[in-house]
């Protein structure tokens, strides 16, 4: 679909369009749609609601806003192929620290330029094959990196960004980079407080 608003990642393939506060990413077959209530704005700070999601994961199952409610979620966002290993490590460490998936879980979003959307089938297929067993329903690809950066307030795409989302759907903590011990400890501490809350 063609872009209806100015922005990066525009082009013939998978360009995002904006209409009445809705980001439609990658056309009707897009993996992810970011729905913004009202005007466009940058979120991503503690206390902000995590942007609403609607689309499909690597199993082709639908992803909705309700996914990031009801328990603690660590949402891991990467922009480059080289980020995949760090993203998987974040997810693995988080699931090991909080094995009860009914209370805490992780989700990965691979954000890529819209110019690569014509390769969606190939890229998603490779990611599907390479995804660790049992994680394909917690990985989504999105071909509009600029849109993801904007709504999450991400300025540096050279790093992996993680967002701890509380059971109400609000961002409780954010970090960037590899899950170094001191960085992961902060996420772990905030998650523990969330799970201890009545």
Image (cartoon, helix red, strand yellow):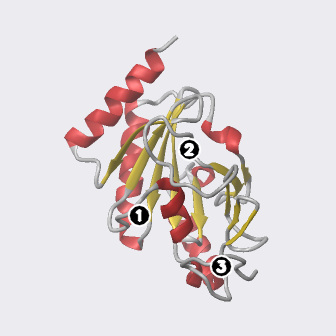
Q: For the point 36% across and 70% down, which residue is it?
A: 82
Q: For the point 46% across and 57% down, which residue is it?
A: 77
User: Marks 1 and 2, Cα distance to the nearest angstrom?
Assistant: 22 Å
Disc 1 versus disc 2: nearer the observer = 2
Residue indicated by mark 1: 84
As drawn, the label of residue 15 is 3
User: Marks 3 and 1, Cα distance to the nearest angstrom?
Assistant: 23 Å
Q: For numbered disc 1, what is the local secondary structure?
A: helix
Q: For mark 2, does the 10 Å Cα neighbourhood hold few (<14), some (14 to 19), or many (20 or more) residues?
A: many
Residue indicated by mark 2: 50
In the image, 35 versus 136, the foreground residue is: 35
Percent x, y of residue 168? 59, 29
Percent x, y of residue 50? 56, 44
Q: Is residue 24 left or right of residue 175?
A: right
As drawn, the label of residue 151 is none
Q: Residue furthest bottom?
A: 12
Disc 3 versus disc 1: nearer the observer = 3
| Mark 3 or mark 1, earlier in chain | 3
Q: Is residue 74 left or right of residue 156?
A: right
User: Marks 2 and 3, Cα distance to the nearest angstrom?
Assistant: 22 Å
| Mark 1 or mark 2, earlier in chain | 2
């Amino acid at each position: 679909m063609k872009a209806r608003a100015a922005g990066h990642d525009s082009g013939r393939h998978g360009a995002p369009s904006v209409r009445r506060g809705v980001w439609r990413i990658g056309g009707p077959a897009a993996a992810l749609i970011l729905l913004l209530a009202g005007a466009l704005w940058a979120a991503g700070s503690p206390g902000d609601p995590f942007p609403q999601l609607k689309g499909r994961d690597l199993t082709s199952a639908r992803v909705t806003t309700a996914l990031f409610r009801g328990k603690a979620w660590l949402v891991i966002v990467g922009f480059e192929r080289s980020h995949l290993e760090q993203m998987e490590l974040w997810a693995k460490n988080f699931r090991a620290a909080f094995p009860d998936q009914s209370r805490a879980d992780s989700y990965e979003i691979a954000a890529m330029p819209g110019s690569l959307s014509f390769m969606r089938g190939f890229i998603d297929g490779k990611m599907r094959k390479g995804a660790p067993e049992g994680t394909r329903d917690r990985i989504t690809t999105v071909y509009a990196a600029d849109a993801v950066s904007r709504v999450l307030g991400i300025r540096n795409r050279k790093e992996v960004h993680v967002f701890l989302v509380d059971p109400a759907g609000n961002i409780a903590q954010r970090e960037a980079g590899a899950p170094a011990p001191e960085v992961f400890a902060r996420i772990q501490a905030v998650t523990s407080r969330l799970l201890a809350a009545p």
